[in-house]
Image (cartoon, rainbow, N blue to C red):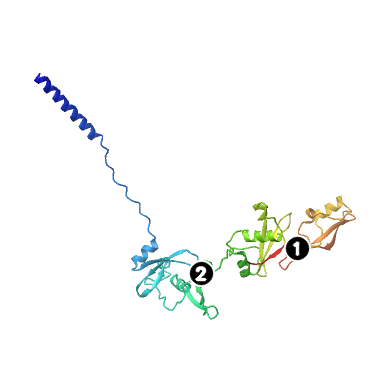
Amino acid sequence: MSQKISRVIRWTLILWAAVALTGCASQPTPTAAAEPSSQIANPASVNCVKQGGTLSIQKRGDGGEYGVCIFEDNRQCEEWALMRGDCPVGGVKITGYITVPSQYCVITGGTYTITNTGNEDGHERGDCTFKNGNKCDADDYFNGTCDANSGTKSYSDPFLYCMAVGTIDEPDARYTGDKMPEIIVQDMIDLGLVTADALKEIQQNATWRCMDSSLWVCHFGANIPCAEKANLDKTPTPEMEDYCKANPTADNIPAATTGRATVYEWKCTYGKPTVGQQILNADSQGFISEFWYQLAAG
């Protein structure tokens, strides 16, 4: 009996040992915690510190951020200008530059020249000249509206653009706003050139240009030749000749045949095209003035 009990105890111990070993074998192997990913450092900022400077993040007039590397005696460099070599290691003195735009000019490698001491409005103005020979108004440069690489000021407001460029047949690269700004669409609605409930595509089916520093708009509407200059030629075209052969006494040659940019009436007399009276006029830039409308800023 005692031997039987002993065997039972022995087998019980073996089973418990097996269970314990199985539990150990099923324990998951601990994994190393993932290393946090590090962001790539701004090389210009790293270079600032490497050169012994202290970095300060500031904002331009357009809200964009830029880094200023500050050295001893408050000498400064814009961080990328420092890295490019446009601003010397150790920085430049900003003492004497009383406006932020003038300081921004010199720490980015430009040369600042006062053009207006501010006697009229209390705000000093000046030009910033770059090593490539280009020049910007310092305020425009600081506000992000003049490019150091081109020296050209840009405009997102079409009315300000026209005031600046004077006269141009179509907006060029200096205009950076919407192709057909909403303010122009609203003015066309007010003039009755298009309705307020028209599809957006119809409302924007127009073009604008600058003449004498004012903004002028033309809506294409029913085949209006906005993009064409006035045709002042009184010489009949082959298409007119063919039309009059088929319609020798027609009182009017249709615009589809004469071309919609002609400023004259045309008819057929004895099978020949005949020019009539002038019914449209060309403006100083050569466009048909009756199709264009001057818009007032603001």
Task: Point out the tag, 2 or 1, that comes first from the N-terminus.
Answer: 2
Q: Residues within 10 Å of mark 1 (few under 14, many from 20)?
A: few
Residue occupying the point 65% across, 61% down? 184
Left or right, residue 10 beside residue 36: left
Measured along the vertical axis of the image, is residue 134 above or below residue 181? below
Residue 204: x %, y % from top left: 65, 56
Relative placement, left or right, of 77 versus 221 is left
Is 55 or 262 nearer to us in this picture?
55
Quarter of the image with the N terminus in it: top left
Query: Which quadrant: the C terminus?
Result: bottom right
Amino acid type, residue under disc 1 in the picture? Glu
* Quadrant in which residue 39 is drawn: bottom left
- Label drawn at residue 141: 2
Element under disc 2: helix
- Is residue 103 shown above or below 197? below
Label 1, secondary structure: give it.
helix
Q: Residue at x 39, y 67 (%)?
A: 56
**Residue 271 occupies which quadrant of the picture?**
bottom right
Question: Is residue 133 visible to the viewer in this orientation of the structure?
Answer: no
| Near-viewer residue (72 or 286) | 72
What's the amino acid at mark 2?
A: Tyr
Q: Is residue 80 left or right of residue 52?
A: right
Q: Nearer the viewer, residue 61 or 265?
A: 61
Residue 294 visible in image: yes
Kindly identify which residue carries mark 1.
Answer: 290
**Measured from the top left, where is residue 222 in percent x and y?**
74, 54
Pointers 2 and 1 in contact (C-beta within 8 Å): no
